[in-house]
Amino acid sequence: DSGVTQTPKHLITATGQRVTLRCSPRSGDLSVYWYQQSLDQGLQFLIQYYNGEERAKGNILERFSAQQFPDLHSELNLSSLELGDSALYFCASSPSDRGRSYGYTFGSGTRLTVV
Amino acid sequence: AQTVTQSQPEMSVQEAETVTLSCTYDTSESDYYLFWYKQPPSRQMILVIRQEAYKQQNATENRFSVNFQKAAKSFSLKISDSQLGDAAMYFCALIQGAQKLVFGQGTRLTINP
């Protein structure tokens, strides 16, 4: 157990629908990162939150949005889903000042299948 | 911009042998950190080893070691005495400055019994 909790583990939904993925960071970590991993591909950075505020955006579609709540958990919202959105979505967390040097701690991911 | 390249999509090795996975990177910074992550069939991302760019000494973690060539911007991973449990996708990754962790495309490692 890495300490980063993601729910649900699996999600199957239809095209055009909206889903919410949830992440609880490791205790004490203030930064949350979302990554997308398509089939047999590397991880693509989507967005980062630090202590409730958006810090950086990567290749995140306009149909996707995220937020981090006062208790530091984060949610990634995916709307108007398309078949190509099917992927493994990872959440990762890091301490406020040491993530850069110690890397991130990853959750076990949410497998999203759009049918 | 920072980029990470893994030129070997797949590698295989006999159990108990040694294998080296290659990684090259590009960065404009002098202060950065390099990582190898392992992703077994469970899909969990597991940190294997890390290297600070300012340290000349190569990092080691038990059977895992790196060959860090800063001038050549090369960061290879050596796995000694390969075990069946080492079978996984291995990702090289880089952080520079305030940027985010950037991953290579991965190398799928197969261990032959």
Image (tube, helix red, strand yellow):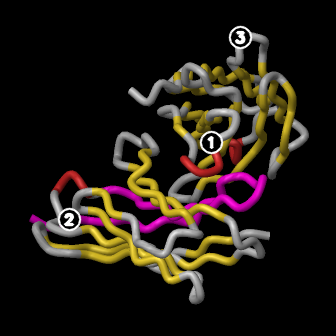
Residue at the spot 36% in from the left edge and 40% down from the top edge:
B42
Looking at the rendered image, the quarter that the N terminus of chain A falls into is top left
Q: Secondary structure at mark 3?
A: loop
What is the quadrant of residue A66 in the picture? top right
* Label 3 packing within 10 angstroms: few (<14), some (14-19), many (20+): few
Name of the residue lying farthest toward the bottom: B72
Amino acid of disc 3 = Asp
Observer-nearest of B57 and A11: B57
Residue at the spot 58% in from the left edge and 27% down from the top edge:
A12
Label 3 to label 2, Cα distance in Å?
Answer: 43 Å
Amino acid of disc 1 = Arg
* Label 1 packing within 10 angstroms: few (<14), some (14-19), many (20+): few
* Label 2 packing within 10 angstroms: few (<14), some (14-19), many (20+): some
The chain to which mark 3 is attached is A
Residue where numbered disc 2 is placed? B111
Q: Which residues are magenta?
A: B88-113
Mark nearer the viewer, 3 or 2: 3
Residue A98 disc label: 1
Q: Secondary structure at mark 1?
A: loop
Residue at the spot 61% in from the left edge and 38% down from the top edge:
A89
Name of the residue lying farthest toward the right: A62
Label 2 to label 1, Cα distance in Å?
Answer: 34 Å
Q: Is residue A115 visible?
A: no
Q: Please say whether residue B97 is one of the residues in the magenta stretch.
A: yes
Left or right: residue A9 versus residue A75 is: left
Question: Could you tell which of marks 1 and 3 lies nearer the N-terminus?
Answer: 3
Q: Please say whether residue B70 is one of the residues in the magenta stretch.
A: no
Residue where numbered disc 3 is placed? A71
What is the quadrant of residue A46 in the picture? top right
Observer-nearest of A34 and A11: A34
**Residue A42 vertical position relative to residue B74 in the rendered view, above or below:** above
Residue under disc 1 on the same chain as residue under disc 3: yes
